[in-house]
Amino acid sequence: MKTIHKLFTSLAIILILVSCKDQDVEPTEQKTLFLRHKGADMPVWVHGNAQSNKIVLYLHGGPGDCAMCYRYYFKELENDMMVAYWDQRVAGASSGKVDSATLRYAQFSEDAFYVVKLLKQQYPNAQIYLLAHSFGVELAWQFLTTNNNQQMISGLMAVNGMFSYYRWLYHVREWALREAKKQNNAEAERELMANPVTLENTATVNWELIYRWMHKLGGNPVSLYDDKKYLANYAFASPNTALAQFTHSKAYSYYGEVESRLFEKGALLKNIRIPVRLFWGVKDGIVPVEVGRETQQLLTNTSVSTVEFSQSWHEPFITETQEFNNAVRSFVK
Amino acid sequence: MKNIHLSLYLMLGLLILTKKNTQAQSLRISYYGETISHYGLKTAYEYPLFSKIKERNQSLKMLLIAPSAALYRHPHNHLGIIIAPELIYRRIGKRGTLLEAGIAPAYFRYFLEGSTYQVTANSELERIRYAGGNAFLPTVFVGTGRALSVRRGLSFDWYTRLNISQQRPYNTSALNRFSLEIGAIFPFKKQ
């Protein structure tokens, strides 16, 4: 029994030591919140400078991606502001028992409303900014063009994301065609020419073919898996559930086949009154920079600025981290 | 939910029905975790249902039932409790090499590690204490180790085990999980 006792004591000491690590000292905020809504338990991790009274709420892409997994790149921002990393329903480390019928723009927007409300409740004096990437930009437009939601937000930073499925696919095809010509890829050129994108055929055109060629032609060669330090951080230091990331995408078939194809916010962008900054990796084929330029033209009733990242594709915060974070800081200050 | 009840009833039933035999029972204590950063403890009480020594190579074959409980922490995510009736086939070779495989229809209870707010019917946010969920966690495992009692005369064996589980429900479907156990088995009586 002595051996058992010793073993128990040693394990208890190890557990206590491990659980004591990574405790930030005030005034640095380090809070884990969960929003429970319509079957989903969605984590919101708030980290950073609590005295700044500024919160950047990160709206991750995907759908089905994760927020905290990108903290590796945004962590430096936490010296100057709080960053709220929210995992959307059926994404990242979100859990619960969720009906796949809730995976709709309207529901994501409703979730975002309550996340913002929760942050306002927790930090009543803080200004909230949205930092939206890719699908997160779709979510941001949905949220900001619904009811009076934009009154809750001090500004939007939109990173390589679309406002209209039609305009998006149109520009992806144009991008791929340009690259096919540049790379003398006759097969790509032929197939892309055979699949023109028009407003009328947006819901039926073979988008996967266009998307596949875009990738083959180098639309986004950046892979997180190439960064060993990032992977180690993801596996051992992030609160994500290791294998969950690979289960989410299966739930989004309706989004891919129906919901996203109907997405059109172009006409509503004139209603946006909060400051907007567009961040764009100019080499991106996934959401080409032309989408960003059209977005700017449609935002007629607010101040819009654009920061283009010449060495970046779809995730400028990965490829030009320092420049990206500086641009966030200058927008939020 | 039906599966969760089933696993709990199964464990209770096995505990009651397992006759107190004269063969060795043992206590198992181990580290339990998905990685080193999702750490925990597991304990189990092993009852042999059947055991046989093969004359040809002097290997011991056992069929064990082991009610087990694991507690682990996934920091900033959840605290998990896993309760399972394990059915284990174990072979201990002449030189003490331990090999095992088994199944465990486990009950999984988790508590979210953070302040949880639920949206009420009035669109307000209401704090919920001890928020979490229940799930069925069917598990299969394989393990290896060494029975130190065989050659070294020590009163315990060490083992390591890989568990492959599926959490149901998880979001819209299920989640596959891998976890590792490294620990010791302490027999109460010499066999």
Image (spheres, rainbow, N blue to C red):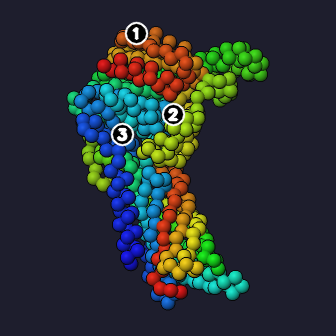
Q: Which residue is mark 3?
A: A44
* Mark in front: 1 vs 2: 2
N-terminal of the two: label 2 or label 3? 3
Residue A314, position as x, y percentages in the image: 54, 25
**Viewer-nearest of labels 1 and 3?**
3
Residue A83 place in picture, x, y as percent? 35, 32
* The one of A275 and A4 positioned closer to us in this rendering: A4
Name the residue at 67% across, 28% down: A212
Residue to which mark 2 is pinned: A62
Residue at image mark 1? A300
> Which SS class for mark 3?
strand
Discs 1 and 3 carry the same chain letter: yes
Mark 1–mark 3 distance (CA, rounded to whole Å): 33 Å
Q: Nearer the viewer, residue A288 or B174?
A: A288
Amino acid type, residue under disc 3 in the picture:
Val
Q: Does any portion of residue B81 appear in the rendered image?
A: no
Extreme left residue here?
Answer: A125
* Residue located 31% across and 26% down the image: A80
